[in-house]
Image (cartoon, grey):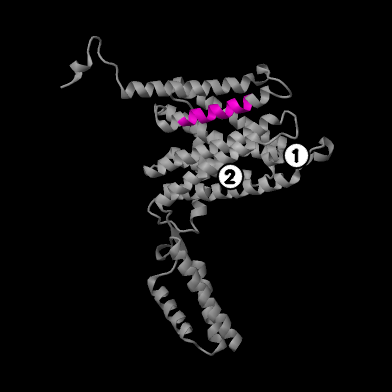
Amino acid sequence: MHSAMKQTALSIHLLLAFAVIGNSCGFVPSKSVCGFSSRTAAFQDQRTTRMIHGSSKPHQHRAIETILYSVGKKVDLVFNPDKDLLTKAYRRGCYLFVSLAAILFLIPDRTATAQLATKFGGAAGYGMAGGLCHILAGANDHDRLGSDTYTRLNIGLLGFCALGIMFVPAEAGFFFKATPAIIMSLVLTIAQGYGILLSFLGWKRGVDPAGTVGLRQTPQNLVEELREGTKNTLRGLRVDNAKKALFYRNSVLLVAFGIFSSIMEGFFNYRYRDALQRSWFDVSLQGSAAARLFMIITMIYSLKDAAERDKLTGTTFIQLNLMVGLWALTVGIGQAIYPLGFALHRAVEMLTFSLLFFTKAMKSQVEKQKKSNPKKKLGESDEGLRP
């Protein structure tokens, strides 16, 4: 009897502690999504109150525990990330990913092979993740996370971190010794976990700014968002504004082929690792590349969508053009300096790719300045323009 009472008291304390913690974190039980009426809830509250005041009958304890279990299954938690805290979190994510990019870029390359370009590309990938955090922080400040562009960028960051966290050590494996490689792998895993949580909260705030969707329903909505987003992306490959959007559509297809190639190469490296003399390090590099390209394809598709709407002069899209161009340039440099010296012909494809995106960014910037500062009429002075 006493043991049953102790178990009941422990259940009560855990339930109350969970409620207090949830309330302090912004998680609020929602009756609108609990699945039971207010009358039923009141009845269960009465049963729980009788239990709190104590009852010595074992069958009543079992019934009370059943009620608590059923209520726990039905009660959903509604949460809405705080705007200011989310902005600060994005800023910290920016600093974190950029710092990791610098470290990965500077670590020595123990392979001394063509994988140096992969190392450079991996470092640039974390730099792009930091850039996305910077863009998304600004979007959150202006309550723009709900637009298609920033929803897509949040999902791109989420995919980069969620896919990358499964492939360890990836770029950390370039260290000569095992100890720093293990430490760096742990740091990358923590950073990617932070990125998963950050992008998920940003996506949640964008699609549900009022915070009315419960925690149990949110993952289902995310899966639905990914499914519908994939369908819309495939439908959106058709080009209406060929002059501005065709380049981005072709770039999306090119990066998609790159994702497929990385996945297949990683699969064969793993499947035939003994015959090909491959290690998990080789497999993890291909998985990391696929995660990185997933993020890039969301960025380029956002540019394609903006080109269709003639919105490339926006600051976000100029930044995206620059980021993709910098990534391609970094990979091209890695290709050119292997094995020794510098040979441009080994990197002509990536350097051309980067040049095209830099050109798009400069053209958008010039067009933006023309719109903000229209040309004066010929022969008209500054004094003549004043009232």
Name the residue at the left extreme: 387
Report the disc number at residue 161.
2
> Where, quadrant-wise, is the C terminus in this rendering?
top left
Q: Position of residue 178 (x, y in %)?
A: 75, 45
Dominant SS in magenta: helix
Q: In the shown orientation, is residue 383 left or right of residue 6? A: left
| Foreground pick, 64 / 192 | 192
Determine the residue positioned at 40% across, 63% down: 32
The answer to whether 320 is drawn above or below residue 5 in the figure is: above
The image quarter containing residue 341 is: top right
Q: State which tag comes first along the sequence, 2 or 1.
A: 2
Q: Which residues are magenta?
A: 319-332
- Whether residue 328 appears in magenta in the rendering, the answer is yes
Disc 1 is placed on an element classified as loop
The answer to whether 133 is drawn above or below residue 54 in the figure is: above
> Which three-letter amino acid code belongs to the residue tagged 1?
Phe
Q: Callout 2: few (<14), some (14-19), or many (20+) C-alpha neighbours within 10 Å?
A: many
Badge 1 is on which residue? 176
> Where, quadrant-wise, is the N terminus in this rendering?
bottom right
Q: Position of residue 204 (x, y in %)?
A: 46, 50
Q: Position of residue 336 (x, y in %)?
A: 67, 22
Determine the residue positioned at 54% across, 20% down: 355
> Which three-letter amino acid code belongs to the residue tagged 2?
Cys
Q: CA distance from mark 2 to mark 1?
A: 25 Å
